[in-house]
Each structure stands twice: as structure tokens, then as C-alpha cells.
Image (cartoon, rainbow, N blue to C red):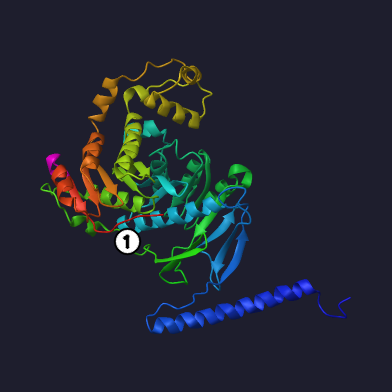
Amino acid sequence: TNKGSPPLKPRRTLAAAAYSHCAAYDSAVSTWFSAQNNEEPAVTTRAYELAFPLKYGCNPHQLPANIYSLHGATLPFKVLNGKPGYINLLDALNSWALVKEVRTALGIAAAASFKHVSPAGAAIAVPLTEVEKKAYEAPDNLSQSALAYLRARNADPMCSFGDWAALSDVVDEQTAMYLKTEVADGIIAPGYTPEAMAILAAKKSGNFIILEADPSYKSPAGEMDFREIGGCVFAQRGHGDKLITPEMMNNITTKNKDLPESAKRDQVLSSIAIKYTQSNSVGYAINGMMIGVGAGQQSRVDCVKLAGRKVTTWWMRQHPKVLGLQFKSDVKRQARVNARVRYIEGDMTDIERKTWAEQFEVVPEPLSPADYEEHMKKLEGVTISSDAFFPFRDSIDVCTKYGVKYVVQPGGSVQDGGVTDACDEYNLVQSHHGMRLFHH
């Protein structure tokens, strides 16, 4: 029927490919000439290549959904196992940037636990106390990577259920064995030992998502990031290469200038963590571990309160009454986590309390107001970081209820003086690092 010619459909496919190739070349030439004059090109053409299709976008009704790479370039990761989804990849890219930057800044193995493009927790490989080992149900003889991830996940283990894991270092067998016991969607890391790969690839009936990040990846598009939303194209310089460093914490604005290295480390960790958290955001950290992240609130003091509630839960998990809860032998790990949190929160309905009580050999008495007050007074040396300046002193007044001694923020508000005065009243140490960290 085609008189010896190829069918129409493949001819159209080949024609589209040829014109796409020419368009990408012409765009590259145009961009190059504009760059020689430090000018923005009048017309910017972005050429993409289909990398792989996705099951759907953020929601099942958002189809089609795909991942593209820039023309002639690779993606910043390889898919080693499983089929990542849209939100999985957003989590992967943000969490990898976080742990990579922490590793660069502090020189210690780092990990993050992400949910919906914000960290539920992030940490570095700092040894656990004996109480923390019991509170986290930690296995013995953890490697540095395993230790970092266990700590990241135990900032807020209820929120970390079904998380995305990110590791700054090659994943070893111990880290994989720990991940095997937790409910998670996937992981990104710069590499995996053969033993770790075998363990993780068998998780979730073989569907666990494993991505290998390229630590040396540089975007072929240069410094600019583009995003298309609702018929508009947003373009801005990325700030992934604008790193948070320990030296940025030396600008101390308070009368108290006693900033130990451990606190400076927490300032760096918490600032990097909220750099990759949906704004407005604040984060609390202690001993190389995020212990409360408040994300996506319109009011900054609400971020402080939200994250502070998470700090309270984290710290109360180490209360003797919580450590002494006597679970029945058939209660699973995540159910024990959830039961402890609900015991601490205490706001159960009568029906919920009846079901909750069935998990224990001995039903515990509720925590008293004195239990909270006495235990919270023991928490000290906490750092709080904010992604933008504190506009009022209310955030300082609130955060001191959660053991805060060290404050770090960009500064730059007309109210900086009043906020610093509030820090002085509480004898806090405050640093201004000078870089706003909004993330959307």
C-alpha cells in the first residue's frame, strides 16, 4: 500500500526526531552567543529527552507523567531497582542534596529520612547514649552509615513510616540490614556493597526502589533552574552550590559568645536540613541530630511550636515511664513506635484508649503534668535554626521551652535588635549566617 515506502507513522517519528535534534542544536548556538555578551536570550528553548515514564504524577489522575533528561545529558542518578514515582524522585533529589552538603560541611557520614519533599529527620554518625539505644531499639555494632540513618529516622519515627532514605556514603550490609526492618519506599546513595544490594533488592517483594547518585554530577544547563507551572516558566539561579559552612556561624550577635564546636556542628546541620525543607521552616538539633522539624507553615512562630511539639515527643520517648512500657510479644515494631507516641501525646478518645491498651502486658498509668515538666527541664543545649529571620521575639520566647541554648538564622530583619535582646535575656548564643533559605 505504501509502494515500497515506510509506513507513515515511523516516518513521522523519524521526522520529529530530526527536527527536535536540529532545534536543540539551534537553541544551544543561540544560548552560547547570548552568553558571550552576558545577555539573556530573547527566546530560550529547552530540549528534553524522555528518560522513563512514571506510573502517574503526584496523584493517580495526573497522567501522563514522565521523567526527562536534558538533551544530550544523563540524569543525576541511576535506577538500580524498582520503579520510582514522581514524589519518590522529588524526595530523592532533595534528600541527596541535603546529605551530600552535610557530608561536605562536617566530614561525617550523614543520612536523611524524607516524606513529601521535607525531612522528617536528618543526622550524622554520632554515637548513641545508652538511653537512646533503648529508646530507639537500636541493634548493636552499627556502621557509620547505619548509625546516621537510625538517628535520622528516630527524630520522628511516626512521620518516617514509609520514608525515603538518603545516605551520603556507600551503603554497607549493616545499613541494609537495619533498613530491612523498617517500612520505607526507597533509598538514594552514592553506591552499595554487593551484600547491601542483595538485601535491599529483595525488600518489598523486590519492588524496593534503589537509586545510585552521581556525586560528581553537574547540570549541563549550568546555574539556572527552570520550572513550568500553569503556563508560566520560572527561572532562577539554583543555590545548591551555595554551601552552608561552619565558618558562617562565627558571626555571633549576642552578648554570650560561648559557641562550642558541638553546637556549631548542630547549627550547620540544622541550617542545611531546613535549606531542603518546605518553607516557612525551623528545625531543632542536638548532638548531631535533628529532633524536630517544623515545615510549611505561614507563621514562623507556628513552625517553632510545631517543631517544638516534635522535640517534646522525641525527648519524652527517653522518659523512664516510656522506656518501661511492657508490650505484648506480638506487637510489631512500628506499632510499638506509634503506641509510645500516643502515650506521650495522651489525647486519646475512650475508644482509642481501649484499643491502645490491648497492646500491653500491664496497662500503664498516664504521664502526669509533673512527668512532662520535670523531664523537659533536663533537656538543654539544643540548637534552633530558621530558614529566614525571626520577625519578632515570640519565636525566642517559645523555643526556650524546648531546651534551646543556641540560635542560628540569616538575620536581616528590622527587628533583629529586639530578637537579639530577647536572646540576651535568656543568655542564648545567636549566630547570623546571612543566607536566606526559602525552599518551594
Q: Taking 184 as reference, is 19 above or below it?
A: below
Residue 43 appears at what percent x and percent y? 49, 77
Residue 221: image location, x then y, percent: 46, 71
Residue 237, compared with residue 56, is above or below; it is below
Extreme residue toward the front, this view: 231
Residue in front for this viewpoint, 234 or 122: 234
**In the visual, does 239 lie left or right of 360?**
left
> Dot 1: what SS?
loop
Q: Residue at x 55, y 60 (%)?
A: 78
Q: Residue at x 36, y 30 (%)?
A: 317
Question: Magenta part of the protein: which range?
Answer: 424-428
The residue at 52%/74% (across/down) is 45
Q: Is residue 231 visible?
A: yes
In x, y percent, where is residue 183? 52, 39
Tag 1: residue type? Leu
- Disc 1 target residue: 243
Residue at 48% over, 21% down: 352
Between residues 90 and 139, which one lies in front from this camera angle? 90
Label 1 neighbourhood size at 10 Å, few (<14), some (14-19), many (20+)? Answer: some
Tell me if 250 is positioned left or right of 86 in this view. left
Residue 208 pos. (x, y %): 58, 47
Using the image as rendered, state which of residue 331 and residue 404 is in the foreground: 404
Q: Is residue 157 magenta?
A: no
Q: Is residue 127 visible?
A: no
Residue at the far left in the pictured view: 255
Query: Which is the main secondary structure of the residues drawn in magenta?
Result: loop
User: Where's the C terminus, which quadrant?
Assistant: bottom left
Q: Work out whether residue 127 or residue 433 is closer to the camera in this orientation and state it.
A: 433
